Image: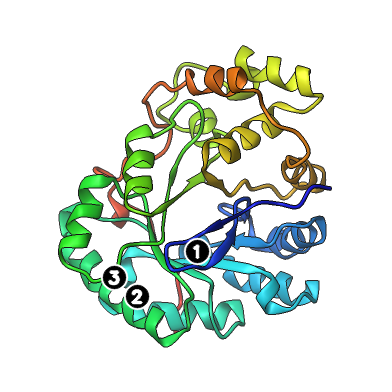
């Protein structure tokens, strides 16, 4: 198998370009899925306090028996903890059963109360300086919000994790991130937010789009593998998720082929500019019930 590519963050830290996500993975399914992913070859795990499965991610990491520094672990601070980010961070480490994380992210910007995000970010800067996080970043920020963050802070985020897939390719965010040395990482990289999201009434499905299926047939790959390969070739990091053993393996088997420039351009042309998931500008995080226990 061809070795998996890495991306260098703006503080010099190396991060796998392809990772394993556990959004909406039930706690009782998460540990086994994480163990399977690590046995398959994934070396990046992405979770969050609000997902309610950090303990199971940590248990899967421990059970896999890999040296801690061989796995890149990301988790996120939920917006309800922005007033006391240090407590939220310490609780995540306890749940994960680790002394540090490789990447710690603000989960949502909360633009109507952005002073809370600024306060939390300054705490994250201190956590980074302490060495208990090797890098810090954000989720769901656009260029305007990143500018606002930069005006009141010392450090540029290492990474910006956003909804990103061929039907919602976020060219402006990707360009901004690239110009400012920020890695763009795709959540919902296979278009799940679009496929299952409440906003999508078109019935469109990236897995049946002719541009994707033609490339899959040409390379003897699945549609999902083609989409993940597209992410890697256009410079995105990506964190597909699954709890199904066969799909976990399928999503990782994307390093032994390359899309042609014409195939990449055909997939680039699929962008609709319409997101499938929540819009950070209007998403009311208070409607998401937090059951996070930081005790």
Q: Identify the residue at image location x=39%, y=31%.
A: 275
Q: Earlier in the sequence, mark 1 or mark 2?
A: 1
Question: Between tags 3 and 1, which lies in front?
Answer: 3
Q: CA distance from mark 3 to mark 1?
A: 16 Å
Compared to 115, does 26 lie above or below?
A: above
Residue 290, can we see it? no
In the picture, measured across the screen, residue 140 lies left or right of residue 193, that is left
Question: Between tags 1 and 2, which lies in front?
Answer: 2
Could you say whether the residue bearing mark 1 is in a helix, strand or loop?
loop
x, y (%) of residue 148? 17, 56
x, y (%) of residue 175? 35, 39
In the foreground, 211 or 114: 211
The quarter in which the C terminus is drawn is: bottom left
Residue 48 tag number: 1
According to the picture, the residue beneath numbered tag 2 turns out to be: 124
Q: Earlier in the sequence, mark 3 or mark 1?
A: 1
x, y (%) of residue 31? 72, 65
Could you say whether the residue bearing mark 3 is in a helix, strand or loop?
helix
Could you say whether the residue bearing mark 2 is in a helix, strand or loop?
helix
Is mark 3 in CB contact (under 8 Å) with mark 2? yes
In the foreground, 82 or 190: 190
Q: Identify the residue at image location x=71%, y=52%.
A: 4
Compared to 154, does 97 lie above or below?
A: below
Residue 71 tag number: none
Compared to 31, does 37 lie above or below?
A: above
In the picture, measured across the screen, residue 259 lies left or right of residue 75, that is right
Residue 121 tag number: 3
Q: Identify the residue at image location x=32%, y=35%.
A: 172
Count of residue discs: 3
Crowd band around label 2 with a 10 angstrom C-alpha radius: few (<14), some (14–19), many (20+):
many
């Amino acid at each position: 198998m061809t070795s998996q590519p890495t991306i260098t963050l703006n503080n010099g830290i190396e991060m796998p370009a392809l990772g394993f996500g556990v959004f909406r993975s039930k706690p009782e399914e998460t540990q086994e899925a994480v163990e399977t992913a690590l046995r398959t070859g994934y070396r990046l795990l992405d979770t969050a306090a609000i997902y309610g499965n950090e303990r199971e991610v940590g248990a899967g990491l421990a059970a896999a028996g890999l040296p801690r520094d061989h796995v890149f672990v990301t988790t996120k601070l939920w917006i309800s903890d922005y007033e006391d980010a240090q407590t939220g961070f310490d609780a995540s480490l306890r749940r994960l059963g680790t002394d540090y994380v490789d990447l710690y992210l603000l989960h949502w910007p909360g633009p109507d109360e952005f002073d809370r995000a600024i306060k939390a970010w300054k705490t994250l800067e201190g956590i980074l300086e302490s060495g208990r996080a090797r890098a810090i970043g954000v989720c769901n920020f656009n260029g305007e919000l990143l500018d606002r963050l930069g005006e009141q802070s010392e450090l540029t985020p290492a990474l910006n994790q956003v909804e990103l897939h061929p039907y919602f390719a976020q060219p402006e965010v990707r360009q901004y991130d690239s110009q400012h040395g920020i890695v763009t990482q795709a959540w919902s990289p296979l278009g799940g937010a679009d496929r299952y999201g409440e906003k999508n009434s078109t019935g469109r499905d990236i897995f049946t789009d002719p541009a994707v299926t033609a490339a899959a047939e040409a390379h003897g790959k699945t549609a999902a593998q083609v989409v993940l390969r597209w992410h890697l070739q256009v410079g995105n990091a990506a964190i597909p998720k699954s709890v199904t053993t066969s799909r976990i393996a399928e999503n990782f088997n994307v390093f032994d082929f390359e899309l042609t420039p014409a195939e990449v351009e055909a997939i680039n042309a699929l962008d609709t500019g319409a997101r499938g998931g929540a819009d950070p500008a209007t998403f009311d995080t208070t409607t998401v019930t937090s059951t996070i226990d930081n005790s």
